[in-house]
Each structure stands twice: as structure tokens, then as C-alpha cells.
Amino acid sequence: MQKSCLLVPIPSPPASQRVGRGARFAGAGERRDRYGLPDELESASPVGYRTRPSLTREEAVLASGLFELESPASFVAGAPPTEGELFEEAALGVLSSRQSTNYAGHRQITLGPDDSARLVPLLRRLEGIDRLVLDGAAYTHIGLTRPYRTPFTFLLTFIGHKSVFSLFTVPKRAWDKRFHQVDDIPTIGYLQHLHVGIWADAMERAAVLASAGKRRANVLMQPFSGAVWQKQNAAVVAEIESLCGLGAVERAAGWRVGLVAQVGAVSAPSPLSPTLCRKLGATLMALRSERIQPGVNAEDKAPAPYQTRQDMDVPPELVEMAGRAGYNAFCHWTGIDREEAKRLLLMERIDVLTPGGKERLRTVRGELEAITDSIVAHLPLWADLPMLRALSKNAARGKKAFALAGQRIYVGGLSRPEIEAVGLDFTHAVRGFGAAAARSALLCELSGCIEIPEGCDLLAGICLMAGPVNQNDVGKQFYGYADLLARAFAGRSPTSLLVWTLKAKTVADPIGNEEQLQSRARKGTLVDLRAGPHEAVLLRRGGTNEPMRSRDGRVNGERAFGDVGNFVSDGEGKEIPGNRGSAWPEAWRREFPWG
Amino acid sequence: MGVIAPLRFDVPPAVSLFSVAMPRKRNAGEIPRIEASAQTLCVSAAAYSRVCGFPETGFVPPTYPDVLTRGLQLAVLTHGAFPLPLLGILHTEQRIELLRPVAVDEVLSGRCWVEGSRVVRKGVEFDLHSAVSVAGEDVWSGVTTILSRARTGDGVKRPRPQPAGWTAQRSVVWSLPPDQGRRYAAVSGDNNPIHLYRWSAKLFGFSRPIAHGWWTLARALAELDLSAERPCVINARFLAPVPLPGRVTFESGPLQTSGGLHFELRRKDVCVTGEVHPT
């Protein structure tokens, strides 16, 4: 059973420290960097660049219900979904819940009511099913996932080789990655599944918010997790793939069914009002990783608001509630007992506020930097030199990405032997871990939106990072380092999976974590790496898969929940041209896609 | 000059580019009333809607009747009594009155006329009127204001009407491909060389082809997602050409003083501006 969670207001800093980002547009001839606002945004993504709307305490209480959603027990007849509702559900789900913006590793095929009914007997034949398979779904999302591959994993291809043999071992590893989906290091493989868990958890909230509380999602994940279930369910999964039109080409590229979400109307609608659903939807669109703790880890060139420490802290009640939300999610997705979950989720706090934390943090940073130095030192020159040392420069840049700053810093992970000892598939547990991390982070982020003072961007932000864990894993696999959690959980064979850095602050991070995205060559245009619906969502109609919102030469330009109007602007209210987006034609928005 | 007999057609005539481009004797006289009408206008709006971004709703887009009456407009403008050359004319303003929704399967008739002109800063301006009717009932009318620089203007700078206060609620960047002009020409029949190719635009003094004014207006109205079922009045001004390929930002929002909508298309400066008022 899940326990009730509450969002926890965060005390504001003294009035003199209540500042926001205050970004402005670059003047003529002025150098553009990520601290300014981009000249324009051309993007099919539903997200855009948003500000956090301020939630009242009453709204926060109502929103707390989102952290303890149970799977529906049945569906009832309800109004058919409109295209617009499906779009906004996808916006909160597949299009925004993956946290790595350059990982295009999720896709969704949405089946209409007839295909959903055909799917039900297949789902009931699955082994390892951990939810009721429900009749009467209005539609069903088939969630596809593929291995985590980004520019970082390209770099990993060259890491950990012996100098003489690298001429052979690098191509072999590249071949294995491309054609056999073999990961360079285990934690890269886990990333895919962490993301699936994050996505699954987001889908449940997305169904509620996009339907103004009328519909719920019944997400089935376990039968598609891990080698054991996949082997047992291979024949049924092949039929599901056939039903949703997943072909040999996609399979060869590594795409697999990762989850199935049945969505339908429920007899007891959510207590959230339609207005609050829209506000919360717009808020979720605004949440982004917050890496900078003002006055702690800002670059020298960052503007003044980033350079000044703020007298703020994270209330202990918030940390407790975040933990409760995380345990809720882990229990919900793995079916494990709550006390068992507390034992299985390994968390080490390493921030400066804990006894000996400063030294511990310094040790961790030192180890990660030493690993980076080893990587750079051992990169094959035959690959690095022709690329003008791009590989070593990229590897060195990683140091900046491991920004271990915040009032609360945790390393989290699991112990494979302990997970397997309780009969859980490790991959599925990793997914549950991803869901737990995302849900606890969301509670912190929404808490940071309660009664935001005038002129401030937020009151708390969080960054969930896998970078330090991956770096540590490189050290483990190739340079003899121990796991980040090995010291705190000696003798339990821990595998660290994520790092949380939770910050109380009022200044939001700049738009665009990658400075090159605002290069002069692009004249200040921000390149949006986030997918549009036509790139990640397919609607199955009449036996074919059609991209969502690609019609008659038009693709989506609408920002989900844009009616709330929370768009970034400069101090004078001038907005980023193109950021508000356009509206999808109302006639198309109102359609029932399978009518 | 005596009264010119109206031109009557069963369907709008096909006027060749040659007759449009043919040099004509300049005539300093006033523009006489020249009128043309057609009994039947053939509606085939699907391709047009796709190029302009209108959803197919069973009603013709509010800018589409211009395409239907294009042949009549050219018949008027290439009439022997019309005193100005067509090459080099510029579309500066457009007014559209959608009197009632026009279904795609209705039998339409059309007429066009021109009469009179006025001297402006850079030349002479005249209004080309078009109207579309169903069984004698006018359902759509348009007034296309055209600037001809074939005559000397008075050099007097007149104040532009400023939009009433408005707040942007939509903002979107359009990337216009190099063949945008050709795509619109294919569905509208407006094959003015300045819209088609770089080389053909250069012949008329443009370094790059420019987007059709009518396309920018149609695309803007599609972006506004006006319900084709609601009567309205649309006013647009074309202030600067939109070169192809290019990027422009479209912004729109409600006017503060009325129930209308304001829209703008801008590069560095505003290229197209307009308002839509429901009636």
C-alpha cells in the first residue's frame, strides 16, 4: 500500500535574496551564451521554455494525491478521447518524461479501442503480469524502448582498451553495440530501464491530468522487463509487436516493447479540478534539471544572481516526504513490501551537511576526476588525433557535468544479489528504482513551486544525474575502482544507479545546458533537441501507424497546457519569439482519432 | 472614355503569363470601370488547403475565393482599357469580408471590377474588387489594394494605421523552404516570376524569390485557426517582402479594444500585419 504524501512548502530566503534569473536578450553585437535568452525557438516539442507557476497551499494539498495513484481496478464507459487530450497526455508522458534530452530512446504506439480490445487476451497470456488486465480501455499505449545511445556512449566505445589491441577491440565493441545491443558498461544498460521506469510513473499522472481527472492509466511493465520474462513471453510479445506494427527494421535497431499502458475512464474521477489539472500540467512542462546552486558551483562568467549564496535550506519534512514518495513508487512498481523496499533501496547521503560529508564529497569528486584523467590518458591516439582530440576534449568536459552541489546529495542504487534474493528481476527493479527517483524528485520540484515569492523562479530544484555513476562505472570496469556505494554498504555488492542533488534556491538554471546550442553560427537560435509528437508517437489506425500531429504538411507547433501562459520572458516581459507556439487546428484537435 | 461593356464568362478565363507581361502603352488617364464576371467557379480547395495549412472542414478557406476569381482579376487587369502595366505592381493591402460560410460543394459565381485610383507616396494605388455569390447572394468579397510605380507618386508620407493594443498569445517560427513560391503557384495559378526562382526574381530586381502576399495571409489565417463557419472581416497590410528561403515569426493575440484578433509576421521588422474581426 502506498502512504499519503504531502507537498512541503519551502521557506523563502530573506527579502534581499529573493531574486530570479532575470535573463535578457543579447544586444546587437553582444556575445550570446546560455545565460541569455535565445533569439527565437523553432520547435515541434510541446514543452517550449516555461516558468514555474506558483501553486497555492490548497492546490499543493490537492496535487499531493498524484503521488499515491493506484492502478485502476476497472474501466467504465466514458467520452471518447479527443486528439488534443492524447497530445497533452503524450506531452506529459513520452515527450517529456525522459530526462536525457539527447536520448531518443522511447516511442509510443497508441492503439484505438478496437485494437485495445484485441490486445487484452494477449496481455492475459503474459507471464509475470503484476496488474489486472482490464477490459474496456479507451486506448492503449505500447511503449517502445531501445538501448541508451548518445554522444557519450559513442565516446565510451573508445574507453578501456589496451593500446596495442585497440585497433581490433574498438571496432569489435562498436559492432557489438550496433548489431547486438551490447552496452559498454553495465550502468549504461541500466539507464534505458531507469528511463522506462520514469516514463511508466509519468504515464499514470499524465492520464489523469490530460483528461482533467476522468481517465486513469493501467501500466503493465513487469512482463516486458528482464531476460527471464522476455524469454517466457517471447511468443506473446511477438504477437503484440505484430498487432502494433513493430517491424523487423525497428527490432534490428534495438526497439522492444517496454511497457503497455491501458487507459480508460474510471468511475471515481480525480478530485483535481480541470483548472488545477491544467495548471499542474503546465507546471510539469516547466520542470527541468537544476544543476546550479547559487554561490557554490556557478561558472565565473555566470551573472550575479548565480554568484551569491542564498540563506535557504531544504526542510527535513520535505526530505521525508520525498523518501515516502520514492518508496511509494518502488512498492507500486515492484509489488514489494514497504519495509523490504526500505532495506533494498540503498541510499547514501554525501552532502556537506552530514557528518564527514565534506570529506566524503571531496573523495567522490576526486575519484571521478581521477577516472576522467585515466580515460583521457588511455584514449587510443589513432582515434583521438584524427578527430582533432574531440574525444579527449569531450571526456574532459564530463567533469563539469558532475556538478555535485546542493543541500542534499544522495547516491542511490540497488544490490543485485539482494534484489534477486527476494525474487525480483534486477532489470525490473532498476525500472522501479527509476520510477522511485522520478517520483521523489517530482515531489521536491512541486514543493518548490508553492507560493513562489514575487521575482523568484522557484524555491527548490533537483537534478537527477547518472553521469557520476557512469563515470564511476568506467572506473569499476576498467581502472579498478570500487562502486560509489561500496563504502556505505560494504559486503552488500551495491550497484549505484543515480545521484540526486536537491537544492533550495530561487534562481532557475539557464535555458540550454549546452552552450554550443546557442552558437553564433546559428545566430542565437536555440536548437531544441526535444522530440515533437510526430517523432515519438504513432497512432495505429486502419492497420497502419501514423505519426501524431503530422498532417497535410503541418507538424505540431502547439505547447501543451499553453493556455496557462507560463512562458519565459525577459525583465520587460518580452518573450522568446516562437516559444508560445501555435495552436493545432481546433477541428483536428477535437477529433476522436479512431472515429 | 465611354462605358466599357462588362466581360462575361461561363468560367473564369485562363489568362496567359504572356499577356500579363506584354508591355502596354502607358496611359495617364484615370482607371475606368472594368468589370468581369463568371457564372461558375470550380471549387477544388484540397491542395490549396494543404499548401496553406488549412484543415479540411468542408468549407472553403477564407482566402480561397481569391484563387477562384484570379482569372477574372487578370481579365480585368489585362483589358485594353486598363492604363497601367502589370509588371512591377505590388500587393499592399487586402480586405476580405466573409459574409457566410461557403461549403466546398456549393455552386459559386464570381465577379471582379476595378475603377479609379489615388496618388500615394510612391506611385498610384487602386482597388481591385472581387465578389463571390451563391444563387445571387453575396457570400464573400475582397478588396485587393495594389500599388503601381508606373506613375510618379506625390512623395507625401502618410501615417500608417497603428494596431490597437494587443497581447501575443501565439508565437511560432516558420521556416520557409526555397520552393514555397512554386508550391503556392501550383495551387493558386499565380505564377508571377518574382515568387518562383532566384533567377526569375532577379529579373525584377529581387535578389531572392519572395513569398506570395496571398500565401502569407492564408498561412497566417490558418495559424489563427479561424473557424470557417464564422463570418468575419479580415484586413491585412503587406509592409515588406518575405524572401525565400527564410524564417519568419508569426505572432497573434486578441485586440484589447474589440473582440478581434491581431496578427503580425516579422523578420527583423514587421512584414505583414492584420486584424480579424468576427461579424
Image (spheres, coloured by chain):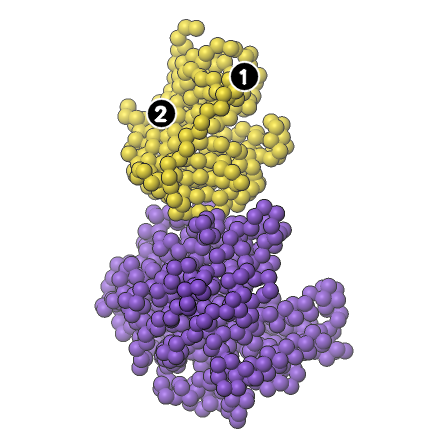
User: At x 60% / y 27%, what residue is drawn?
Assistant: B204
Q: Residue furthest top?
A: B2
Residue B268 in the image, given as x and y percentages of width and height: 53, 40
Which quadrant does the C terminus of chain A fall into? bottom left
Residue B179 seen in the figure:
no
- Mark 1 neighbour class, 10 Å CA radius: few under 14, some 14 to 19, many 20 or more: few
Q: Secondary structure at mark 2?
A: strand
Where is residue A108? Give x, y as percent. Answer: 43, 64
From what the image shows, is residue A52 above or below residue A491? Answer: above
Residue at the spot of label 2:
B131
- Which of the chains bears the disc numbered 1? B
Letter of the chain in yellow: B
Report the disc number at residue B193: none
Disc 2 packing (10 Å; few <14; some 14–19; many ≥20): many
Q: Is residue A301 left or right of residue B64?
A: right
Residue found 33% across the figure and 52% down from its top: A591
Q: Nearer the viewer, residue B183 or A239?
A: B183
Q: Which mark is residue B152?
A: 1
Compared with A561, A429 (above or below) is below
Select label 2 or label 1 by which is in front: 1
Chain depicted in purple: A
Q: Check the image and name the residue furthest to the left.
A: A267
Vertical placement of residue A317 versus B165, above or below? below
Q: Residue A155, position in %: x, y?
A: 64, 70
> What amino acid type is highlighted by mark number 2?
Ala
